[in-house]
Each structure stands twice: as structure tokens, then as C-alpha cells.
Image (tube, grey):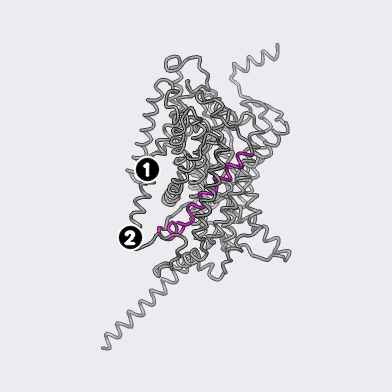
Amino acid sequence: MDSRSDSFNRNTKKNDDDDDITQREEALYSVERIFESKEVPSWQNQLTLRAFCVSFILGILFTFIVLKLSLTTGIIPSLNVSAGLLGFFFLKTWTKLLEKSGILKQPFTRQENTVIQTCVVATSGIAFSGGFGSYLFAMSEVAAKQSTEANNAFNIKNPSLGWMIGFLFVVSFLGLFSVVPLRKIMIIDFKLTYPSGTATAHLINSFHTPQGAKLAKKQVKALAKFFSFSFLWGFFQWFFTAGDDCGFASFPTFGLKAYENKFYFDFSATYVGVGMICPYLINISLLLGSILSWGIMWPLIQDRKGHWFPADESPSSLHGLQGYKVFIAIAMILGDGLYNFCKVFGRTLYGLYLQFCSKDEGAVLPVGARPSPPEPSMSFDDQRRTTLFLKDQIPIWVSIVGYVGIAIVSTVTLPHIFHQLKWYHIIVIYVFAPILAFCNAYGCGLTDWSLASTYGKLAIFTIGAWAGASHGGVLAGLAACGVMMNIVSTASDLTQDFKTGYMTLASPRSMFISQIIGTAMGCLISPCVFWLFYKAFPDLGTQGSAYPAPYALVYRNMSIIGVEGFSALPKNCLTLCYIFFIGALVINGIRDLVGKNKAKYIPLPMAMAIPFYLGSYFAIDMCLGSLILFVWTKINKAKADAFGPAVASGLICGDGIWTLPSSILALVGVKPPICMKFLSRNANSRVDSFLNS
């Protein structure tokens, strides 16, 4: 009896010790234990006027950045971390000044930081989903003139500030209302990762700890330093760009022959910064695509001039070399998009099947309006986050009324903006859009990959073919692409932000309202900023200009293919398109078969396709950014991890904001004073002879 009792007491003491160790470990690694003593503000107090003032300023900055990237290469990195960092810096400075003056009424919290980040990303997100560098500009006369088919007045709609703002306002909010009822199933029941949203939440949480605040100050200093350098470098370069092909951007780094084939370093701080943010594989894939196309294929096809295409064909004609560049790139993009669509859609269906099979047969769909208590087995962090995430409910009727109401308004309005797009086309889109929005949001949670552009291309082909060539099918397809892209893109953005809010204890209501306000800001800011570009740079959208808008021509030709078929393609182009389409499918299949460890050495077809049309100069910039980060990581990994994103953000933001004064200078007619050109020795001798004669 005594021995059994002694054994029991020893085991009890051991279990108590184990529990103490577990609690100590949890306290050590738990984020919410750090903030346990801090009161979480109500959802109303998370939405402050100062937060939206800061969001408005940052929204303009980030819109300039996104539009510049859209109109140059179309590669847009995740700006969530930059938005969180700059939001912290601006509002922390604001509150410190108020605190010193003794009039601070409400302290700066991580929830308010999350509201700013959400609003800024929603605002700048419209610059992408608005299609200013893709489907929307593809409707213009500038894009139509570069295409030999369907360039009649019925398939052209030039940009105008009024209709662009109206269009965005009637299509950009539907995606928000379509996924709100399913936020609980996404975040809590399915526990989707949303890597970008999770990373942003960790960053915001760290900022608001004492140690994190000190690091954030150093990060902000690094960002400010490289922001200043990037801005001043852009200003310095401007002085030497008085004519075409002038300035540092035209420096023949690897020789004049390489320059003719688009191989050169163009001294762009933006793309060096983008290269530091993008994964190594993206940058290497871009470089491989450049070598394959401009280094091998285009010179070989050019040698077949007179056999494969007419020798006197214009360089910009799609019946010549330009046709191979555009349509082979389209084939790779479509192949990659189709593969990833099928993969993510399949994973979505399989994941849903497993989730619902694991529940009781009588279980109801766990929509946001049906709260459930946290499970006892959850960690302290998860219990606290789940409780607060389910506290402030958004009634399901708000989603239904909002979606149906906006759908009715846009069904009536859109045919007046685009006469080629009929009301029944729009109704069909709105019937299927919530399903596709859910699939995109779910797939983004699994892979961090939004397939908004893929769903948009699906709308281009289906609605364009339905409308028909004689009824403006090209323009109808592009408009349908815009409607679909806006719905599915904003849906995945909102669920990503719900994940960030879940991990920072920000209320779903404050997240939803912040997203709506940010989207409304974007519907006004993005068209105005684009209009500034459009008026300041008359050659906007033409190949070889500072802002060629490469995806505009790609999207327009996709729409032409969907409506009219492949009759416009030059000789053997269709065969090459089939080869590269199948090649994109095969490469993606191999990447999935070999596993993650080996897949990081296999290039991405989507990234490889971008330089096919545009050239390799930006790929060289981005690879340099990767090289800088790689060397920095080898020298001091901890410092590179901590300050790499801040340095990259500074380079991108400084060069991006220089676009504003350069646009204003162009609008008022102030031109650079110097043209710095690079000539061969023979050409220089001829110029000297001409000048001296």
C-alpha cells in the first residue's frame, strides 16, 4: 500500500514538473503571452482616422510602384511586408509626437498596424487587378495598332478617367462580399496557411514588442537610406535622357551586339530591389528565358526572314518576328496557367473532400455567422486568436445583400460602359464568380499563389468566343476578363488579410471595413495615377519606350485568338506554340514529381515566358539583386534576413516615387538637358565627319 502510494506521488510530481516545463516552454514561444496584459481595442477603435490618413499616403506611393512595374515588366512582388513596415514607421512617428506634446489619446497597437497594412495593400491591389498594364490598356488604340487583327473601332476603347473609375467601382467590391461568409472555414476549420499573410502578421507582432520595436527602427533607417539613394539616382539619371535610347538605361554593358538583343544592365534600382524580394528561382528562370529567346531563338528565326515571314514585314507586325515573340510567350503562359489551375483546383476539391469527410454527417457548413468555441487541445495562442476572431461577426445577410445589390447595379451599368458586353454575359460571370473566388482564395491559402489572371484569361476565351468577332468579341472578352479578375483577386486578398488579422487579434469587422475603404481609395487613386502616366508619356504602351506595357499586347492577342482563331500566325508559329505549350505542362509536371528539394533547381515556365517578348535587361537587374542578397546571406545571414526586405523596399519605393516628379516634369514640358548615347567606333566616326563637314 505504501509503496504504491509512494509511486503514485512520484508520478504525480513528475507530471506536475512536466506541466510546469510545458507552461514555461509555451510562455517562451507564445506570442500572445507577451501581449496578454494588453487590452485588445474594440473593432471601432481599431479603425482610426490617423490610420486611414497614413493608408491614403502609402496607398498613393504603392500605386505608383505597382503601376510602374505593371507598365514595364508586369512582375509585381508581394508588398505586404513593406506596407506593414512603413505603416509602423509613419504611425509610430505620429503617436510619439503626440505623446511628447501630451495630447495622445489612444496608443498605437498592432491591430491598428494591421488595419493600415490591409488598407494599403487593398488600395495598391486595384492597380494590378484594374488591368492598367494588361486587359484595360489592351482595349486602347495604342495596343490595337500593334496588332494586325480586330483593330477596328468596334474593338477599341481608349482610356478615359470617367469610365475607368466607374468600371472599377462597380466590379471591385463583389469579391469581398463573396468570401466573407466562408472566412471561418478558411482560417479556423481548414487552418489554411496563407504564407504572405502569416509572414506579415509575424512582422507586425514583432514590431510591437520592445525588442522588435528596436529592430524596426533600424530597419526603417535602412529603408530610408536606400529610399533616398534610389530617388536621387533616378533624379540623376533623368538629366541624360533627352532623346530615344539615351541615358544609363541604354548602357551597352556587354557590348553593342548584346545590347541589340536586349542583353544589358539598365541601372534600375527598382528591379535590383525586386530581385532581392523575389525567390532566386524566379530570377534564374527569367534569365534562362532571356537566353533561350533573345540569345538563341530570335536570331535563328530572324535568319529565316523571307522564308518563314516576308522580308519587308514591319518589325512590329504580328506577321513577322514579333508574332513569334508574342504568341510563343502566350503559349507558355497559357500552358503554365492551365497546369497550375488544374493542380490548385484539384487540391482544393481534394482538400474540401477530406475536410468534410472528417466531420460528422450532420455537420452544417461552418460559415462565419455560426461561431463555435475553441477546442481545449489548442495552444494558448490559438485559443485566444480563435475566441477573438469569432467574437465580432459579420452577418451573412450583409454578404448576400451586398453581393446581389452590387451585381444588379453592375449588370445594368457595365453594358453602358462596354456596349459589346451584354447583360446576360455579366449574369453568367456573377453566377460562377463566387465559386471561382472561393477556389482562388482556398488555393492561395494552400500555395500563396493567386490565379486571378488565369481566371481572367478563362473569361477572355469563353465570353469573347460567345460574343463573336462581328459583335466586338475582342473587347467583350477583355471587359469580361476585368470583371472576373477583380472578383477573384480581391477575394484572395481579403482572406489573406483575415489570416493576418487572426494572428494579430485584429477584428474581422475592422479587416472587412478597412478592405472596403482601401478598395474605394484604389478605385480613385489607381485611375488617376494611370492617367498621369498616360498623359505624361505619349509613347506609353509602344515597344521600346520607357513604359511598353508588354502584357497589354499579350492580353489583346489572347482575346483575338479566342474570337478569330489562329489565322493571324506566321509560318511554323503555331507548331512552336504547341511545343512550348506542352513544354510548360511537362516542366511543371516534372517539378511536382521530383519533390520540393529538387524542384527548386527546375525553372518556372511562367517566369521564363516574360522575357520572350520584353527582353532580358530587367532579368539581369533582378539577378544582380539576387546575387547581392546571396553574398550578403553568406557573409551575415541574420543581418541579411533582418534588413534585406527593408533595403529592397527602399530601392523600389525611392525609384517608384521618382516617377511622380518625372511625370509632372513631362506634363509641364520640362525636358532633360543631355542625351547620353553609346555608338560603335564606326558610327561615331561618321557622326564626327558629319559634324565637322
Q: Is residue 562 magenta?
A: no
Residue at position x 68%, y 66% from top? 105
Q: Position of residue 39 (x, y in %)?
A: 57, 69
Q: Earlier in the sequence, mark 1 or mark 2?
A: 1
- Magenta region, residue range: 162-190
Residue at position x 57%, y 38% from top? 416
Instruction: Check contact, mark 1 vs mark 2: CB within 8 A.
Output: no
User: Is residue 658 toward the left or the right of residue 558 in the image?
Assistant: right
Along the line of sight, the residue nearer the viewer: 534 or 270: 534
Q: Secondary structure at mark 2?
A: loop
**Please, what is the three-letter code of the amino acid marked with disc 2?**
Ser
Q: Position of residue 106 (x, y in %)?
A: 65, 65
Q: Secondary structure at mark 1?
A: helix
Q: Which residue is tagged 1? A: 342
Q: As drawn, which residue projects farthest toward the top?
A: 693
Q: CA distance from mark 1 to mark 2?
A: 24 Å
Q: Main secondary structure of the magenta part?
A: helix
* Residue 628 shows in the view: no
Residue at position x 41%, y 51% from top? 446
Q: Which residue is tagged 2? A: 358
Q: Position of residue 451 (x, y in %)?
A: 45, 43
Q: Position of residue 158 (x, y in %)?
A: 60, 32
* Residue 46 shows in the view: yes
**Please, what is the three-letter code of the amino acid marked with disc 1?**
Cys
Q: Quadrant of residue 410?
A: top right
Which quadrant is home to the C terminus?
top right
